[in-house]
Every structure is written in C-alpha cells, then in structure tokens.
Image (tube, rainbow, N blue to C red):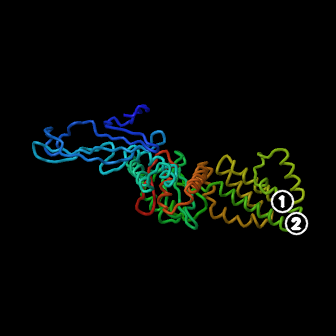
Amino acid sequence: MQDDCIAVALGLPELMILGQVELEDRFEVTVRYRRDKIACPGCGSLMVRKHESKFQRKKDRKLRDKMVILTVEKRRFRCLACGKVYTEPDEVFGPRRRSTKRLREYLGERARHQTVSRVAKEEAVSESLVRRCFTDVIALELGVCQGKAKASRVIGLDEFSVKKRMFDTAISDLEQRKVLGIVEGCGRSNLERYFTALPDSEMVEAVVMDMHEPFRQAVQMCLLKADTVVDKFHVMSHVNQALDKVRTKLQSKESKGRRGLLFHNRYLLLRKAESLNPEEQVKLSRLFSLYSELALAWSLKESLREWYKSSSRAEAEASLHHWEESVRKAGLKEFGIGLPMFRNWRNEILNYFDHRVTNGLVEGMNNRIKVIKRMAYGYRNIDNLRTRILLTNGETLASTKAPGGFHAF
C-alpha cells in the first residue's frame, strides 16, 4: 500500500474500492458494488451464489486534472431455486456503457456551451461520445417539455442566416423573452405548418415582423385574431438608408477635402437629435450650412422618429399623412422611393400604436446566434445549429424537429 498519499472521496457510494494507484497521468481504481446478493429477476429468490465475475475498465470524471479509470468487477449470479444465471444491475454506469453516468452528464452539459471537439480534447474522450452525451441531455429536457410548441400573446418573427444563401426563421415569445421554435427557410409554407400546429393559436394578439410578404401571408392565413405589426426598427432603417443615399450622392460630387467632411460624419447623421452633445450639434450645423439638401433629408428622418411618439393611432395616422406630403414637397427621390412602402404596409405600420411592441429582443437573439456560429467556426450539420439556438436562447431548454421542417419547444 502506498504510504505517500491521502484518501480522496470518489463520490460513488454504491461502489466499494478494492484497490487504487495514482500514476503520472491517471488514477487506477478497482471497484465492485457493495451489495452481496441480488434477488433473482425470474423468481425473486435470494437463494443465490456467485457464478462468475470479470473485470471491465471504464472511465469516470477527472480528479485533480487527472483521468480516473475504474476497473469494475462485474459479477454474475446463479439462482439456487430456478437455476437462472443473471448479471447484477449497473446503476453507476448503465447497461453496456464504458463511462459513468455523471461523466456523460458532465460532457453533455459542457457541449451545450462549447464545441464538441474542444470538450473531447480537454476531457480526453472521443468526439462521438461527446455528441451522444449532448444528444442525451437534449432528450432528457425534451421529456420535460414533451416537444410541444406553445403560443404566446405577442410573437416576433425574424430570419437569420445559417450559412451562405441559406436562411431560417426564429419564432420568439416577446413577453417571456425566449425562442419558441425555428422554422426551416423563410418562406410561407413551413411557417403556416408551424402556426397550424399551435394548440392555442387564438391567444396570439400581435406578431411583430419586418416587411417580408410571406410572413404577412402566413399570419393572415393561420392567426386570424392576431394583428401584424411592422417593427419600427425596420421602418426607420429604410429612412436611414434614404438619408445615407442623399449623403453619398452629395459626397460623390465633391472634391477630396469636402468628401472627407461628409464621410466622417456619416454615423453622426444617423444618431437621434436628443443624444447629440453640444460639440456634435455644432458639427451637424456646419454640415447643414454647406448642404441644405442634407439638412432637409435629416429633418425628414427626425420628424418620422418623432412620429413614433404619437399618443394614439388616430393621431399617428394623421401625422403620417403630413409626413408623406412633406416628402413629396421636398422632392428628394431617395425618400420618395420609400413612399410605396408606407402605402403597401400602412395598416401593419400603424398597428404599432395599438400594441407598442418591437422586435428588439429578436434582433438581440440574432446577435447571439452569430456568436454560436463563430464559436464553432460554422456548422456542417444545420440541425445541430438549430438545436443549440433553442438550448441557449430560452429559459425552458428543450427542442425537437417536428413534421413540416420546424423545430419547436
């Protein structure tokens, strides 16, 4: 027996330690289960004797940054009453498993937040084992949620890129701040199948989205009581783009020195007026004194931003009409091009004033999705990416792939 070591609890009270040795890179521990007899699974008799035993090497969680290898004595018993021969149960490891349950759970949990290859390398196990453990964690949580999609009072829709020229759609609960499901692609048919599968779709009051026609058609077809709300960020984004086009048009006509003045203030033009400090206000005043057309474009942008502060839908509808007239009188074609958008999506844009909801949460989740993709340097298996998105974006962490090409809680 070694006389230069101390005892450290293994943390597996079901097992009795028969021998142990600490090597440079691992601990070797010989164990067997503490019980002496196991009732016969055939007749229930305790009149049994050990028939044979063999030893199996299995892996456990690291101890002090060293691997732990358990050599387990696997015993078989013979029933003296009925003659049946059987193997004792293996609760610590599981049937035909070469690792402890706690190691597999640990690997699965780590794989939720790190790449499979990194976990496998650091824990000195195979990547296939880490993948299986990750799948087991998902399956366990799936059993809690039963894989059912649930409706919400306010839903957000937004597409995100899964790989080059390939998009999926995230469906989010904007009140509970979690992802409800992921629809394959950003078309109408799969989204309709998702909404049709919702058991309580009548509770949905508002669906916030960008101006993507298939989204609107799917909501109108399946969520009859829900109002479609165009996210104000996307409306303002169109107006900001019009302002920037005015700037680039003026910039292209200027000499090199004046071009720099327009270019270096490009982000300042997009800021809201109340966030500007005195120095920045002076910069804009100087710019507007040189370019009256730019000053007019900026005032149109700011007036639409102020329009979103209207106290009621009726006030907003009247103010929007005045803003559109201002655009026509200004004669800026960059802004005039956007007027059909307000005509085609007018009701959906005005629905904001009935619900006062935005897709800011969904846009934040899209940033998290980008981080997930960067952590893995991209995903070859798109189902793995969709699963990770569901696991990391919701409070209730479970997912499944349902018929019709969508993933849901």
Judge by depth and name the residue closer to the eye, 286 or 325.
286
| Residue depicted at 15% across the width and 38% down the height | 46
Circle 2 sits on which residue?
254
238 to 152, vertically: above or below: below
Does any portion of residue 17 appear in the rendered image?
yes
27 to 201, vertically: above or below: above
Element type where label 2 sits in the image: loop
Question: What kind of residue is marked 2?
Answer: Glu
Q: Earlier in the sequence, mark 1 or mark 2?
A: 2
Q: Position of residue 71 (x, y in %)?
A: 33, 44
Element type where label 1 sits in the image: helix
Circle 1 sits on which residue?
262
Q: Residue 237 is drawn in which quadrant? A: bottom right
Q: Position of residue 196 (x, y in %)?
A: 43, 59
Relative horizontal placement of residue 180, taking residue 87 as reference (left or right)? right
Judge by depth and name the residue closer to the eye, 128 or 149.
128
Relative horizontal placement of residue 368, taking residue 341 as reference (left or right)? left
Judge by depth and name the residue closer to the eye, 104 or 227.
104
Question: What kind of residue is marked 1?
Answer: Leu
| Residue depicted at 41% across the width and 31% down the height | 3
| Residue depicted at 79% across the width and 63% down the height | 246
Number of residues whose C-alpha sits closer than 10 Å to that of mark 1, classed few (under 14), some (14–19) or many (20 or more): many
Judge by depth and name the residue closer to the eye, 73 or 258.
73
CB-based contact (under 8 Å), mark 1 and mark 2: yes
The N terminus, quarter of image = top left
